[in-house]
Amino acid sequence: MSRPTPDPDRNAQDTEAGFDIQPDFERFHQRDEVFRRSWWDARIRSPKSELFYATHREPLKSWRPTDGFTQKDYALRNAAWHVSDLFTDLKQDADRREGFNDEFTLTRGVAAERMDLGTPVETAAEIKRVAKGFGADLVGITDYDERWMYAKKFSDLTLVDRPQEIPAEVTNVIVTAQSMDYDLIRTVPSALSGAATGAGYSRDAMVVLSIAQYIQNLGYQAVASMNDTSLAIPFAIKAGLGEYGRHGLLITKEFGPRVRLGKIYTDLPLAHDQPIRFGVKEFCDVCRRCSAGCPVQAIPDGVPSTVRYNQSNIKGVRKWSVDGEKCFGYWAAQNSDCSICIRVCPYNKDFSKWWLRVGRWLAGTRLRRLMLWLDMRLGYGERMDPKRWWSARA
Ligand code: SF4
Ligand code: SF4
C-alpha cells in the first residue's frame, strides 16, 4: 500500500498551524542539522565540541571548581542521560545511533493478527490513554506530512547519507512531550541543568518505545522516534501540542518550552487533533527575553523572516530562526547544553499553580505588556544558584 497524496486543503491547514511556507521551500537534510554537522563540518567540529560529547560518556580529566560544573553536577547529568545513551549506543556496530540519528528498531515486530479498535476517534482516545499510562505528559495526533521528514538521513559514524526507512503504509504521527524539571532548568547555565534534558530524553525513549510496541502488538505498523528522521516541532504544532516561539522552540500550554518531543509513525487509523492558539505569537511580538538573554545573540529580535544564517536553517519558511552555529558553539564552550532561552521565557512556569494559569491567560490578552513587566519585576527567569538546588529539602 502506498502513502495517500497530501491533503488538497493543506494551505488552510498551514494557515491554521501558523506555518508560512514560501515557494522556494526545500525539505531539510539531516546532515545539515547542527549536531550532525559537529561530526563532519570543520566550521563546527573542534576539540571543544569533541570534549562536549566525550564528557557525556566519560569523566572529565579535571573538574571545574565552578558551582554547577563540579563532579557531582556532571555525575547527575550523565546519570540522567544514561538510559537514553544506552539506546543510542546499542546498535552502533550496525551504523545506527537510535533516537538521535535513526528511528528505533528495538521492538519485537508487528503481530500477525490485526485488531479493530473501533472508530478513529475511539482509537485516538485509547492511544492517548495508553500513552499517558506509559508516562507521556502530553500526546497529540496529526497526519504524516512528508515536508517535515528529512530529505535524507545522515550517519554520524560513517558520515554517509542514507534514505528514510519509514514504512510506506504510515499515515499518522503520534507526538508526545515529556516535561523537564522546572528547578533544574532554573540553574542554567550549569552542567547540573543538563540533568533535566537527559532525564527528558531517557523518559521519552521509554514512552515512545512502549507506545510503538503496543501498536505493533495490535497488528499495525509503528516506528518510535525522538530527534531522528524529521523536524519534530511542525508535527507537534499540527498535533495541537503548542505554538512556535521566538526562540525556535515549541511552547506548550502546560509546561511552556520545557519539553522534549517524541514521535511514533503509524498506520493505525486515528482521528487528528487541531493546532491550538493561546496568544504566544502576539506575546513573542512584544517580548524579547530570550533574544536579550542569549549569551551569543543566536535568537532574532526582529520579525519572522526567511533569513538563513547558515545551512542549519530550513529553506523557504518565514519564521523566527535561531543561528544554530552560534548556539552550539556556546554549548561546546561551556561543556554542557544551554537552556537559558527556556529558563527566561515567561511561559516557563509551574502551571500547577492556579495564579500562574491566570497569568498565562492574561498574557494572551491586551494585558500582555503588563504581564511581561510583572514577570520581570517578580524575578521569574532568574538563575537559581546550583548549590541551592542541591541543598533544597525533598
Ligand atoms: S540554548 Fe542558549 S545559546 Fe542556544 S539559543 Fe538558547 S540561550 Fe542562546
Ligand atoms: S522569551 Fe518571550 S519572546 Fe522568547 S519565546 Fe518566550 S515569550 Fe517568546
Image: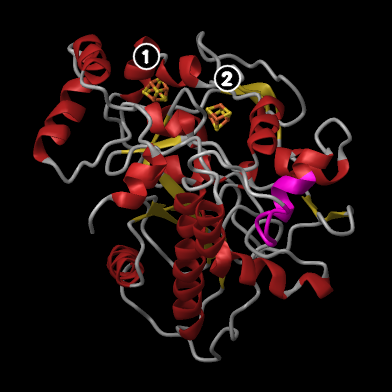
- Does the magenta portion include 60? yes
Say which quarter of the image contains residue 353.
Answer: top left
Q: Is residue 240 visible?
A: no
Check disc 1 and report its element: helix, strand or loop. Answer: loop
Asked if the magenta segment contains residue 27, the reply would be no
- Mark 2–mark 1 Cα distance, whole angstroms, equals 19 Å
Magenta span covers which residues? Answer: 50-61
Q: Residue furthest front?
A: 65
Res 213 visible: yes
Q: Which residue is mark 2?
A: 318
The answer as to whether callout 1 falls within 8 Å of ligand 2 is: yes
Along the line of sight, which residue is nearer the eye, 71 or 233? 71
User: Is residue 136 placed above or below 43 in the rendered structure?
Assistant: below
Residue type indicated by callout 1: Cys
At which x and y percent is residue 248?
A: 52, 29
Q: Give the number of the disc on residue 287.
A: 1
Q: Which residue sits at x=34%, y=37%? A: 256
